[in-house]
Image (cartoon, rainbow, N blue to C red):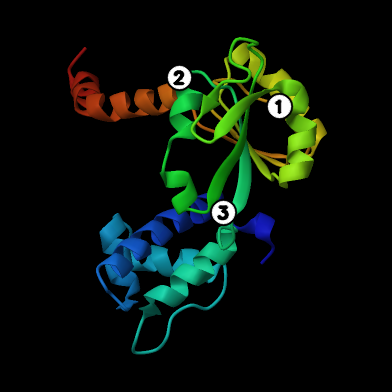
Amino acid sequence: MKVEEIPDPAVYRLSFYLRQLEAFRHLNRNTISSKQLGEALGYTDAQVRKDLAYFGQFGHPGIGYRVEELIARLKKILGTDKDCHALLVGVGNLGRALLTYKGFPRKGFHLVAAFDSDPGKIGRRYGELEIQAMSEIVRAVGTLRIRMAIVAVPPESAQDAVNQLVKAGIRGILNFAAVSLTVPEDVFVQSVDLALQLEQLSFRMSLGTIQNSLAAPM
């Protein structure tokens, strides 16, 4: 099967499998079954086996999955088996929080440069990083071998920032701006809309009320 034929939800669930396997490893679990892995995440064992089957053979008869082995293979599939340098554009409240987030280096992602268009922020230091002007992006990408970028700017500034990133050679962008972006076909954008996620959560919380109102006689 070609990579582009693998369903996006299956790829998405790989990250959850990896996170749960790392939790099992922390508990000194050496092997795990598809049923145990699925139950820990609210999936069926059939779903687990189907998702993993898109990427090859993983289990061992009479044993199930070897936790350490499956962690290594999932990391390789996800491309997180080696460290990745990333940069940040936008050092506002969200950007500063992302700079100090400890979860990135634990997963092999290292923020090695930060940029902003506000002259008042350029030259300031946050942790080990000094905020640079946007004009320095091309130089930094080449010098620091940066592969990914995180965009945490206002929506009206996002497309311009992304255009500069694409021109610099960035091919993977995590976008926190609540706006759709236009990029070339060989550039990949993953958007995180926090307000949208809250809307979905609010809907689920209100589902009982909605069902009752729909069932009520007119």
Q: Is residue 78 visible?
A: yes
Amino acid tagged 1: Val
Q: Is residue 166 visible?
A: no
Q: Describe the element under mark 2 as helix, strand or loop.
A: helix
User: Real-space Cα distance between discs 3 and 1?
Assistant: 27 Å
Q: Residue furthest right?
A: 167
* Residue highlighted by disc 2: 93
Answer few, some or many: residues within 10 Å of disc 3's Cα (few below 14, many 20 plus, some between 14 and 19).
few
Residue pictured at 52% horizontal, 78% vertical: 57
Image location (x, y in percent) of residue 7: 56, 54
For the C terminus, the quadrant is: top left
User: Real-space Cα distance between discs 1 and 2?
Assistant: 19 Å
Q: Image quadrant of residue 41?
A: bottom left
Q: Is residue 58 above or below residue 173?
A: below
Residue pictured at 39% horizontal, 89% vertical: 61
* Residue highlighted by disc 3: 7
**Mark 1–mark 2 CB contact (< 8 Å):** no
Q: Describe the element under mark 3 as helix, strand or loop.
A: loop
The one of 31 and 5 positioned closer to us in this rendering: 31
Image location (x, y in percent) of residue 28: 27, 73
Amino acid tagged 2: Asn
Of tags 1 and 2, the one toward the viewer is 2
Of tags 2 and 3, the one toward the viewer is 2
N-terminal of the pair, mark 3 or mark 1, is: 3
Residue pictured at 42% horizontal, 21% vertical: 195
Q: Residue furthest bottom?
A: 62
N-terminal of the pair, mark 1 or mark 2, is: 2
Q: Is residue 207 above or below residue 47?
A: above
Residue pictured at 59% horizontal, 56% vertical: 83
**Left or right: 90 as drawn, with respect to 20:** right
Image location (x, y in percent) of residue 36: 27, 69
* Residue highlighted by disc 1: 162
